[in-house]
Image: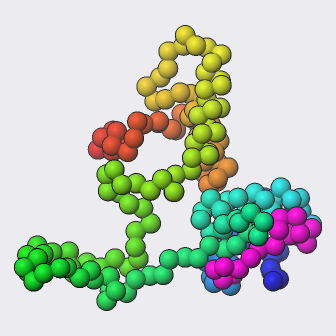
Amino acid sequence: MELHIRLEGRKGLADQLYQQLRAGIDSGHLAAGTQLPPTRLLAEQLGVSRKTVAEAYSRLTYDNLLSGVVGRGTFITPRLPLRSSESAAIPLAGAASLERWQQRATVLGRRQLEAPSRYDFIGGASSKAQFPFDQWRSCLNYALRRSQRHPDRQFPAQGLPELREAIAHHIAYARGVHCSAADLLVCNGAQQALDLIA
């Protein structure tokens, strides 16, 4: 498979590669299930370091656009197909249930979602598969290592400064959002965050 990638200049190569691969995936030029070249081979073809390619692949994996299979390679992740309005209807059991639900769901039935929701906001039913446990663990370990230098220190209500610094660093690396620790607030969960902004 030949990738048509042009990197310009010597700065931001990983970001350029990420953007071009993402555009190819989003446009369908790079189809789901397609195997991408190994990082070493692609780096050699593009004349960049292997770290540059690995960083772009890592960002695409973080965005659930790539998945790696040990011993087989890196593949473009299949996307979920959009559901049509006919297939979105769920049959109910029993005529009595159907009548009762039709009366209650008249308004809801008019609104059709174009695509299934990527995130489930039902309380207590969150998907652990979407949470970046490795990155979270890394940020926590970093903050705890630094906080052990001052065990008797009082901490501000907005969260450990070291943890907020680590989160700001991770957000800048993973998403390209530049912020400082002062811009962040660590909450005990979504409910606390919603209470604070309401």
Q: What residue is rendered at 81% in x and 83% in y?
A: 1
Q: What residue is rendered at 37% in x and 87% in y?
A: 84
Q: Please say whether residue 31 is one of the residues in the magenta stretch.
A: yes
Q: Is residue 94 above or below residue 49?
A: below
In the displayed structure, does residue 103 sit left or right of residue 58?
left
Tell me residue 29's x, y (percent).
68, 84
Can residue 26 be seen in this snapshot? yes
Q: Is residue 27 above or below residue 8?
A: below
Seen from the viewer's position, the closer of residues 161 and 82 is 82
Q: Is residue 154 above or below residue 98?
A: above
Q: What residue is rendered at 7% in x and 79% in y?
A: 96
Seen from the viewer's position, the closer of residues 151 and 78 is 78
Count the marks: 0
Tell me residue 59's x, y (percent).
67, 59
Q: Quadrant of residue 141?
A: top right
Q: Quadrant of residue 33?
A: bottom right
Q: Please say whether residue 165 is one of the residues in the magenta stretch.
A: no
In the displayed structure, does residue 110 sit left or right of residue 156?
left
Tell me residue 76's x, y (percent).
67, 74
Region rendered in magenta:
30-46
Tell me residue 57's x, y (percent).
73, 63
